[in-house]
Image (cartoon, rainbow, N blue to C red):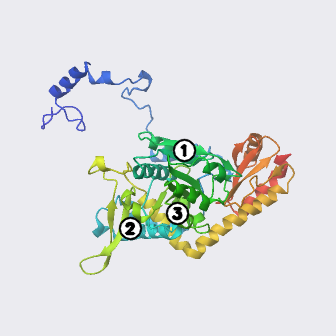
Amino acid sequence: MTETGTTGSPYAPHTAEETAAMLEAIGVDSVEELFEIPPAVRFDGEFGIDSRTERETRELVGSILDRNDELVELLGRGHYGYYVPSLVDHLADRSEFLTSYTQYQPEISQGFLQALFEYQSLLVELTGLEVANCSMYDAATALGEAATLAGRLRETTGNHVLVPDRLLAGRRGTLENYVAGTDLVVEEYPTDEGTADVDALAGRVDDDVVMVYAENPTTEGAIEPGLAAIGDLAADADALFVLGSDPVALSLLSRPADVGADVVVGDASVLGLPTSYGMGLGLFATRERYLRQVPGRLVGASEDAAGRRAYTLTLQTREQHIRRERATSNICTNQAWVALRTAMHAAYLGPSGLVDLAERDVVRAEDLAERIDALSGAVAPVHDRRHFREFVAHVDQPAPAIAADLEDEGYAVHVVGDHEIQLCVSGVTDAEVDGFVEVLPEVLR
């Protein structure tokens, strides 16, 4: 028994008498009876890990990493890699950024807070919406937060959330988890030529719909031509129009606010981070009238006592650390350091550099599609749309076999159908694209 009169773990501070009373109330003899842990996974006091010196550990880790295949990745579908200037690494790796948690103390976090303010400002300019937070886990959680926001706005009527039938499985799964504890129901609407089938969607949108979600570009890289029409359908049904995109695409495509979007979600880590296939940076921007419904945190600008411009966390609507019953979100932290890197990368590129990067994605994707289409045994792109960054190609031979042969040649592609592969040019050099085109004719035979 400790000095405070408790036994066992300090994180479960109950006296022996209290524990006995609770066990008796639920009809068991011990705490262990409350858990069913298979013997095979029970801790027996030994980890079974041999001790190693630092040098031996490095050699072991190196030998494991050496087993990875060195492939040129023409992969996309939600994960995009761009060259990240070394300036971003050097600045973001400063100790005052790396060791910072959350900027609760503005008097010692002005630099970090200003960077996050600029990140918010960047998203506001790109989306045309008035409010952007700083920031969220990834695109999937941002989509989930948008759905629960829509549910709160229409809590008395309607519970249907409409998403495209080609929504990435990971994002769909996260969305389903988000709405599992609510009355919201996720339903699909059909797509055609890689984009929304607006006529079919019109037949699905009624008073029971609280949110319509679309993406631009879509999962297949197609540029959505019907955004304004989708926005009108959502507005007529008094539903929230949520649009998925990213900062690079937004620098070139129509501003979401101009096509009626109420919320913009997506992954902002296309800037500032290399491809990570897991870790991301969720962006979330919305209209000012939904300010009090925004999950996460907002950085605001004000003045200190001396009249100097100062930054601080002005709004934290999550509140679960204070009043859980009033929380609008279960997001417990944010991706501040990643948002810092995104802001640095965007500032490095500047407006014209960001547009140049986006235009390059369009030109290179369409050029690669044209070169593939000229080969025997392939048609590209499959969809009759303009494309951004990636596209789907039809191959006469079974797609899994084509992908396997390409892997043997050192290239990784997505298989998205029995005879369809998807290719992405972001993060791939011109020389690597040329090499891919050179080996493709032999693979297609």
Query: Of the residues under marks 2 and 1, which one precedes in the sequence?
Result: 2
**Residue of label 3:** 272
Tell me, for residue 172, which label it has, or none.
Answer: 1
Q: Nearer the viewer, residue 155 or 263?
A: 155
Q: Quadrant of residue 188?
A: top right
How far is the residue under mark 1 from the one under mark 3?
26 Å
Q: Residue furthest bottom?
A: 307
Residue type, label 2: Phe
**Residue of label 2:** 112
Q: Position of residue 60 (x, y in %)?
A: 53, 43
Q: How many numbered discs sit on the rendered protein?
A: 3
State the SS at label 1: helix
| Residue sitting at x 25%, y 18% | 27
| Residue sitting at x 41%, y 65% | 288
Task: Locate the C terminus by quadrant.
Answer: top right
Query: Of the residues under marks 3 and 2, which one precedes in the sequence?
Result: 2
* Residue 75 visible to the viewer: no
Q: Is residue 354 above or below residue 412?
A: below
Task: Locate the N terminus by quadrant.
Answer: top left
Q: Quadrant of residue 373?
A: bottom right
Residue type, label 3: Gly
Q: Nearer the viewer, residue 387 or 63?
A: 387
How far is the residue under mark 2 from the one under mark 1?
33 Å
Query: Of the residues under marks 1 and 3, which one precedes in the sequence?
Result: 1
Marks 3 and 2 close (CB-CB < 8 Å): no
Marks 2 and 1 close (CB-CB < 8 Å): no
Q: Position of residue 287 (x, y in %)?
A: 44, 64
